[in-house]
Image: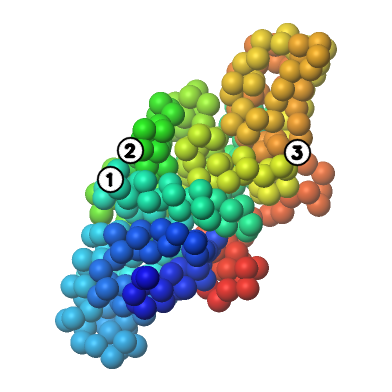
Amino acid sequence: MAGEIYQKLREKLDQYSCGFPLTESGVEFKILERIFTEEEAEMFLGLSLQLETPEKIARRLGIQPDVAAPLLQRMKEKGNVFSWHKDDTVKYGAVPFVLGLYEFQLNRMDRELAGLCEQYFKEAFLKSIAAVDPLMRAIPIHRSLEVSHPIATYEDSRRIIQNKKIISLAKCICRVQQGLIDQGCGKPVEVCLSFGASAQHYIDQGLGLRITVEEALKVLDAAEEAGLVIQPTNSRNPGGLCCCCGDCCAILRALNEQPRPAEAVASKYFAIMDTELCTGCEICLERCQMGAIFLSAEGLAQINLDRCIGCGLCVTKCPARALHLEIKPEGQWIEPPETALDALTMMARKRGKAA
């Protein structure tokens, strides 16, 4: 049985985001024991999602700053916390398991930890993701959007990137993890973009490289060509943008297990097929990551709107131009919260947890 400190740590992580649920096997504790020492777990219990200096954290915990500071620095280097710095000021905060601890293990992920995470995903975590408001927001490929109506900046991947001053590029943790257990999909790996403070954290910890807006747009183009779903974090000011596949991405895997993924995503769009133009080439079937497209008895593509998440992957490669995106009727989509922290707080409250 896991020690008391790790049980408290699990309970704390379960307050955040999509939670950190118990399993019958206890695999979640094996993951925590791989990531945290008992001393680090004790410190994490004293942190909040709000960033604070080591001095403020030390005062609250009743310890000396010269004890707290090096421990927090070590935890930052291990991917146990989020950090922010400006000049000589450094602040630290707790993070959820996803998005957070799991992604920050990028440089420490090995076959053993990858296997433990996969076991946990299958036993409990994918169901936990599916039960809450979406962590990520599927948005259309830029080239699939028509300009006949106003498009919000947070719905346009290129404008999201163009508005960012600091951008980092990292490997996709989901594809890295799946590759380590011999379940990789072969799609591009260096496609994970972070912005602002999140980008700086990735750069400082050696998790990602700083890139320019132009370089980020090229990454986006390559991801779209490879058939990856564009998913920024679910907020109007996203701190990151993932390029996801249905084989590896935990978010899309969780969606794929639902009978009506369209109801569970924050997407504003859905795809429409013109059967008079369709030639039955099946390219759209291969591009769709949600199994939303099938062939009719006549050999023409049909869309199951219960499964369509409005990513636009099918639209851009249709040689007959038989597909296009339309906006969902009002009431079938909601505006995203302002920041990622707002989104995490809303998710926790809806789960009856205090973030």
- Per the image, the residue denoted by label 2 is 180
The location of residue 138, given as percent across then percent down, is: 60, 42
Q: Quadrant of residue 351?
A: bottom right
State the SS at label 2.
helix
Q: Residues within 10 Å of mark 3 (few under 14, many from 20)?
A: some
Is residue 119 rendered to the left or right of residue 290?
left
- Per the image, the residue denoted by label 3 is 306
Please tell me whether residue 8 is drawn above or below residue 150 in the rendered image.
Answer: below
Q: Quadrant of residue 303?
A: top right
Q: Residue at x 72, y 22 (%)?
A: 294
Q: Amino acid at mark 3?
A: Asp
Label ID, residue 110: 1
Q: Residue at x 45, y 59 (%)?
A: 25
Which one is in front in this view, the residue at disc 1 or the one at disc 3? 1
Q: Quadrant of the N terminus?
A: bottom left
Task: Name, please, the residue furthest toward the bottom.
Answer: 62
Q: Residues within 10 Å of mark 1 (few under 14, many from 20)?
A: some
Q: CA distance from mark 3 to mark 2?
A: 33 Å
The location of residue 214, given as percent across then percent down, is: 39, 33
Q: CA distance from mark 2 to mark 1?
A: 7 Å
Q: Are marks 2 and 1 in contact (CB under 8 Å)?
A: yes
Q: In the image shown, does 273 or 354 lie closer to the viewer? A: 354
